[in-house]
């Protein structure tokens, strides 16, 4: 069962990755990265479980955290540079 | 998984929009970390998670804010560099041909020092996480070198970018930002203490699970950077002062180095922790704890400093423009 | 920020710090799983250090430690979970039905909350239920985007708003 | 008996989680613009993530693993709407698609 979960997660990660590549707007990419991040968190948790290594959960937690911070950072930067170059939308 | 990695890497090189490239670099970090997880390299994955997926995109963005978003169109045909890259790549591939087949038992990494590390480290050092014992004890010189590199990098960036002029705290724009983002403000107020505590947890559990000074430092820095992004650089710099950070960064290296000197003084080799205390096992334990602390302090302060440097450079160039 | 937390009476600030302390201790103990003397000592030192830093950063106050809501939160979460499950089913149905089934639209809804915390809980509850996303917020309205007209109408009935308002009464 | 029941429930959770996950992924690819995609992403991030973590928790039983899983779950549930909100907000301010004044009356 867990293997199926891993495969499903990988499939969804590929979907998110293709959304990130396709774009079209920058917000699509950010959204895709965010989704990708949470899926990675789940993936690591499940893989850790599969290997019987609860240490992995620490990594998953760090991921969840880092993912949030970097998405916020990206958005912050983006708003900032939007203010700077008015009308310079993607 | 490796295929995904390759696709992402190609896409990064292909994209003209640097911003999108940074986003993909974040994905690349996440991917390579999952790859490390799947080959059971927990500590590497941990570092990749914190650095490759977190701090790296943030710093790249800060740099982007400085240089502008779109890649300059290359006017000259970069033939020479292409040639150079190809040669280097070919040399690397040639080099790998000499290496033993992946996973073969007589490969040097499997019968040189690794065996000794794996078999002896529980006895000699007495801590469960082997990676930590390798990094912080057997190879403590290397790690000291790495810490110095981080420190030097931070100082270099500071020398290049830091103007010493802090953004004026609580300026009009900053206050508007805080007010605007009330969802972010409330949620991150709840989260920041938890992030900081988690960083310290990672710091002190480096001996038992994945983690240690590098990762902890990065997580701690990420917590502070989150604060800086939401409450304005002025506010952040008022609380976590750059001058203090510079001292701290130096202190971290100093702690590491002085552990070595203390070892020398008590009659052992440089960084030979077993001399620290009468009982060599406990001595090693203490030594590792202390140098990990040094690493954590240096990494955290260096990261925050670099971030400040970029941010203040951006703000200043803004004021000039 | 500074002003807000500075103007609170001392006893209150202590209360929030105490609650943060308990939270952090639980977090450390739950995460660590190793209860040796040394590590517990480190834990205590870390907790105290973090509380000190957060105090310096002025993030410990009524907003980050919503003690006054704690008693009524479980009931709200119970309701929210049911709501989330139901709207998840709706959205999944829409996904498989395809683009023709959806009619994205957005509107401004009134906010009835007294504090920023209440507004934030409301906005996050809206976003947490798939099919509706809170896009922007000012002092008394929130801009909501929904996948279908029904999603908006559901919110307009105001049950969620009433429940959040009840929370901070 | 109890153990069997727990395992059954956990498999049920994981299975539903997988279905929701894939549906969300499809929605992410299929929907026409950012805001709709955001709803699809919401599916994978709220219920799908919760169900999978819940399934793992049931398999793990009481203990430290369960605590950490719970922590991850809570963290995701707090941050994901926040990140979505921030994203939506910056998309609106970036002048994308939705004009609130025009759509208000429609």
Image (spheres, coloured by chain):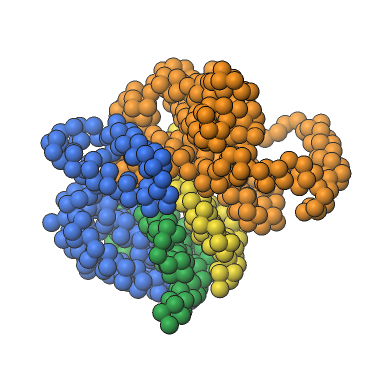
- Indicate the quadrant where residue B149 lies: top right
Q: Colour of chain D?
A: green
Q: Is residue B161 visible?
A: no
Residue B220 lies, in percent from the top left, at 44, 37
Residue B255 lies, in percent from the top left, at 50, 23
Q: Residue at x 15, y 40 (%)?
A: C12
Q: Colour of chain B?
A: orange
Q: Is residue C168 above or below residue D7?
A: above
Name, please, the residue furthest toward the bottom: D1
Compared across the picture, whether D86 is left or right of B136 comes to: left
Which residue is more in the foreground, B201 or B274? B274
The quadrant of the picture occupied by the N terminus of chain A is bottom right
Q: Residue at x 45, y 35 (%)?
A: B221
Q: Colour of chain A?
A: yellow
Residue A74 lies, in percent from the top left, at 48, 42
Q: Residue at x 57, y 64 (%)?
A: A50
Residue A55 lies, in percent from the top left, at 52, 53
Q: Is residue B249 visible?
A: yes
Q: Residue at x 69, y 55 (%)?
A: B2
Which residue is more in the foreground, B306 or C74? C74
Compared across the picture, whether B258 is left or right of B40 comes to: left
Which residue is more in the foreground, A25 or B286? B286
Count of numbered circles in the view: 0
- The chain coloured blue in the image: C
Which residue is more in the foreground, A49 or B320? A49
């Amino acid at each position: 069962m867990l293997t199926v979960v891993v495969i499903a997660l990988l499939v969804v990660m590929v979907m998110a990755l293709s959304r990130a590549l396709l774009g079209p707007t920058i917000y699509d990419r950010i959204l895709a990265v965010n989704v990708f991040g949470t899926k990675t968190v789940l993936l690591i948790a499940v893989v850790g479980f599969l290997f019987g290594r609860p240490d992995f959960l620490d990594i998953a937690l760090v991921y969840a955290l880092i993912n949030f911070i970097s998405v916020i950072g990206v958005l912050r930067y983006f708003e900032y540079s939007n203010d700077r170059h008015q009308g310079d939308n993607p | 998984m490796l295929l995904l990695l390759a696709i992402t890497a190609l896409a990064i090189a292909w994209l003209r929009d640097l911003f999108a490239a940074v986003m993909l670099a974040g994905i690349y970090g996440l991917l390579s970390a999952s790859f490390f997880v799947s080959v059971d390299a927990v500590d590497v994955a941990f570092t990749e998670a914190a650095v490759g997926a977190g701090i790296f995109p943030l710093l790249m963005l800060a740099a982007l804010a400085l240089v502008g978003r779109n890649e300059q169109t290359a006017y000259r045909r970069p033939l020479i560099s292409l040639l150079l890259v190809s040669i280097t790549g070919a040399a690397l591939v040639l080099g790998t041909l000499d290496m033993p087949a992946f996973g073969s038992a007589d490969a040097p990494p499997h019968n040189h020092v690794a065996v000794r590390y794996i078999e002896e480290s529980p006895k000699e050092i007495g801590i469960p996480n082997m990676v930590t014992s390798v990094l912080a004890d057997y190879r403590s010189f290397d790690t000291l070198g790495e810490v110095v590199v981080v420190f030097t990098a931070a100082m270099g960036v500071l020398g290049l970018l830091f103007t010493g002029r802090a953004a004026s705290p609580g300026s009009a724009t900053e206050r508007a930002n805080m007010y605007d983002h009330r969802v972010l403000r409330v949620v991150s107020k709840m989260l920041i203490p938890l992030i900081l505590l988690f960083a310290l947890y990672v710091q002190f559990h480096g001996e038992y699970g994945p983690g240690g000074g590098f990762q902890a430092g990065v997580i701690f820095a990420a917590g502070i950077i989150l604060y800086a992004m939401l409450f304005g650089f002025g506010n952040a710099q008022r609380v976590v002062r750059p001058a203090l950070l510079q001292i701290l960064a130096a202190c971290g290296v100093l702690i590491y180095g002085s552990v070595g000197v203390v070892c020398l003084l008590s009659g052992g080799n440089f960084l030979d922790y077993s001399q620290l205390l009468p009982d060599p096992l406990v001595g090693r334990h203490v030594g590792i704890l202390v140098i990990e602390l040094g690493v954590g302090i240096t990494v955290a302060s260096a990261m925050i400093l670099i971030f400040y440097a970029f941010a203040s450079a951006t703000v200043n160039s803004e004021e000039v423009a | 920020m500074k002003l807000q937390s500075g103007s609170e009476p001392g006893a209150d600030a202590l209360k929030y710090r105490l609650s943060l302390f308990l939270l952090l201790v639980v977090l450390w103990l739950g995460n660590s799983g190793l209860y040796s003397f040394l590590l517990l000592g480190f834990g205590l030192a870390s907790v105290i250090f973090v509380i000190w830093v957060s105090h310096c950063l002025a993030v410990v106050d009524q907003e980050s430690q919503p003690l006054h809501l704690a008693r009524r939160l479980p009931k709200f979460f119970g309701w929210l979970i049911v709501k989330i499950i139901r709207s998840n089913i709706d959205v999944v149905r829409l996904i498989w039905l395809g683009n023709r089934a959806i009619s994205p639209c957005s509107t401004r809804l009134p906010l009835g909350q007294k504090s920023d915390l209440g507004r934030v809980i409301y906005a996050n509850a809206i976003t947490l239920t798939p099919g509706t996303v809170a896009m922007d917020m000012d002092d008394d309205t929130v801009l909501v985007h929904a996948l279908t007209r029904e999603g908006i109408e559901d919110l307009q009935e105001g049950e969620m708003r009433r429940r959040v308002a009840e929370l901070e009464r | 008996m109890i153990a069997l029941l727990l395992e059954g429930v956990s498999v049920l959770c994981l299975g539903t989680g997988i279905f929701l996950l894939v549906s969300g992924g499809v929605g992410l690819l299929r929907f026409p613009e950012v805001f709709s995609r955001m709803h699809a992403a919401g599916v994978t991030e709220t219920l799908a993530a919760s169900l999978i973590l819940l399934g793992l928790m049931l398999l793990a039983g009481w203990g430290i693993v369960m605590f950490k899983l719970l922590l991850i779950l809570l963290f995701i549930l707090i941050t994901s709407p926040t990140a979505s909100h921030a994203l939506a907000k910056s998309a609106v301010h970036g002048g994308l698609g939705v004009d609130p004044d025009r759509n208000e009356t429609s």
